[in-house]
Each structure stands twice: as C-alpha cells, then as structure tokens.
Image (cartoon, rainbow, N blue to C red):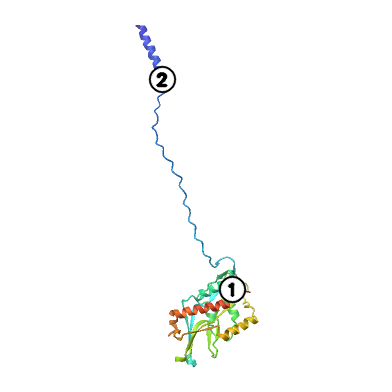
Amino acid sequence: MVRIAISVIALLSLLTQATAQAPPATTAPPAQTATPAKPAAKKAAKPKAPAKLAEPATAGPCGVGVIAATQDLFVVQKIGLTVFGNDYAEVPVSWGLDDLTFARVRAAAGTTPVRRIPYAKGAFDSYYHPKGGLFRNRREELSNLVRGIAGNAGCERYVVVMRSEGQLDGTNQSLNGVGIFSRGVGMISYAYVFIHVGVIVVDGHTFEIRKGPAVTVEGVMKHLADNFVDNEFLRKVDKSTFPETAADAANNTVLRDTTRDFLTKRLDKILPPYFAQ
C-alpha cells in the first residue's frame, strides 16, 4: 500500500517536471493581408514662366537718354489778312505725340540701347515761353534744363526732341511746334498741318550742347530739292479739317491721324543722322 502511494507520487512528480520543461505553445499571429505598394507620386512639373518682352533699359549703364519734349501740345493758328485776324492757341491733346517721338528715336537708334528720361509736367514751360528779358542764352538755358531733368540718370549723352520755330513764307508769322494753321478768307482760305521739331544732343558729363550731324554738300542740295518740290514742314489738308474752335482739335480724329503720320515721317527723316555719327 505504501509502495503504491510512493509510486503514484513519483509518477506525478515526473509528469510535473515534463510539463514544466515543455515549451509554451505559441499562437500563430493572424495572417495579415498584404497592402499593395502605392506608386511613387510624380512631382508636378512647374509651369515655365512666359518669356519677357524686351523693354527699354530703365537701370544700369545708360548710353543714350531720350527726352521727348513736344509736351503733347497742338497749336491751332489763324493768320488773317491783317493782324486783327490773327489767333493763336495751344491745345493739350491725348495723341501720344511724346510716346510716338520716343518710339521713332528708338527705331532710328537701331542696336544702340536707349532709355527714356521722364520729366515733370511743365518742365519746359519757361524755355518755350520765357518771361521778360531782351536777350536770352538759349544754349545755357537748355543745358541747365537738361541737367535738372537728367538728375542721376548718368547717361553718356541725351537726345532731346523738342518743339522748334519756323517762319511762314511771305509773312511775318512764325509757326511753333506741331499744329495747324489757316490763312485767307472764305472760298480762298486754305489749311496746313505743320511740324517744326528739332533734335539737340547734350553731353552727359558736361551738359554742353554737342554739334549736330556734319553738314555735307549732298545734304544741303537734297534739302533744297525737297523744299523746291514741297515744303517739308507743311502738309496741306482739306480746309474743313480746321477746327471751328481751338478746343475742338483735341477730338478731331482726322487731324490726329494726319498729325501722327506727318510727325512720324519728319522724325524718320531727321533722326537717323544723329545715330550715324
């Protein structure tokens, strides 16, 4: 009896040791569903910036500074049979005359870079309409005027296109700048658009006025021939083009287009020699 008890105890002891030495059962982890790999996102291509249009230089070294000084003024002038029939008015117009002037200078300059030099409204008033004084030093006045306008632009030279003055043949009347005049009475009256502009070159360091293009015999003969055929400063227009009042000129599209076309042709004729020096 005692032996049986001892045998049972021994058997239980062996079972206990076997259980303790057996490795614990491992539970298999649940199967995971494979997630398909996402394709690498493509980087969006940056849109190309549009090419910039070439513009006149506004900074950096300046070879030629351009001062367009018609002031967008248009003259309406009547020349009567006597002094009492004369009338003169300057009309501000929005015809882009200074813009046109700069565009023609840039065309005449070719590959020479140019920069437009702005100026305050009325900057040329004292030059065009001096107050008092019998004697004037126009060269000194213009030199000082350009020096003030140029400021710190630092250009090698300045090309100034401004209104000039001419005398109407057979009269003591002068024609100034860009405008239209009428002469005569009734059926025997006529009208002309006139363009009197000049080009002045000013040294960018001393602000002295430089000499213009060299005068040649061929140039003088051509000038005389042009004047013999037709006055290069005048263009005859229908007398109905002449405005009833000076202020009406600003809204006269026929007069505007005629003036712009005539100014273009005059500038294209007189500007190139200044860039051929």
How packed mark 2 is, by other alpha carbons closer than 10 Å (few <14, some 14-19, many 20 or more), is few
Q: Residue at x 60, y 80 (%)?
A: 139
Which mark sits nearer the N-terminus, 2 or 1?
2
The kind of secondary structure element at disc 2 is helix
> Which residue is denoted by mark 1 in the rendering?
158
**Amino acid beneath label 1:** Tyr
Whether residue 133 is visible: no
Residue 43: image tag: none
How packed mark 1 is, by other alpha carbons closer than 10 Å (few <14, some 14-19, many 20 or more), is many
Provide residue 60's location: percent of width, then percent of height. 58, 65
> Which residue is denoted by mark 2 in the rendering?
20
Q: Quadrant of the N terminus?
A: top left
Provide residue 40's location: percent of width, then percent of height. 46, 45
* Residue sticking out furthest to the left: 1
Name the foreground residue: 172 vs 142.
172
Measure how far apart labels 2 and 1 are at the Cα level.
108 Å
Whether residue 248 is visible: yes
Specify whether 222 is left or right of 256: right
